């Protein structure tokens, strides 16, 4: 699932959907999970 399939306008939509999915899947607050969530959040902010 690469981001190139999507038109540019829906990139932030895809990023926020991905972030919501990561939030749902990673309810445990272990350290690598926090890093992953920070990375996804940063990516979502970057794509907006």
Image (cartoon, rainbow, N blue to C red):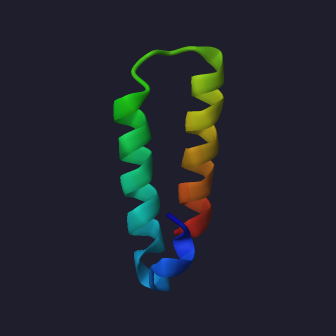
**Residue at image coords 43%, 82%:** 9
Q: How many discs mark residues in the rendered view?
A: 0
Q: In screen coordinates, is 10 left or right of 44?
A: left
Vertical comparison of 9 with 41: above or below? below
- Which residue of the protein is positioned furthest toward the front in this rendering? 1
**Along the line of sight, the residue nearer the viewer: 45 or 17:** 17
**Residue at image coords 45%, 79%:** 6
User: Residue 48 appears at what percent x and percent y?
Assistant: 52, 69
Q: Residue 2: name its quadrant.
A: bottom right
Q: Residue 32: name its quadrant.
A: top right
Vertical comparison of 24 with 46: above or below? above
User: Residue 46 appears at what percent x and percent y?
Assistant: 62, 63
**Residue at image coords 50%, 15%:** 29
User: Residue 35 appears at what percent x and percent y?
Assistant: 65, 30
Vertical comparison of 40 with 45: above or below? above
Q: In screen coordinates, is 47 left or right of 20?
A: right
């Amino acid at each position: 699932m690469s981001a190139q399939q999507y038109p540019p306008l829906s990139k932030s939509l895809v990023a926020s959907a991905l972030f919501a999915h990561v939030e749902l899947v990673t309810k445990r607050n272990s350290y690598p999970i926090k890093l992953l969530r920070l990375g996804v959040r940063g990516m979502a902010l970057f794509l907006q």
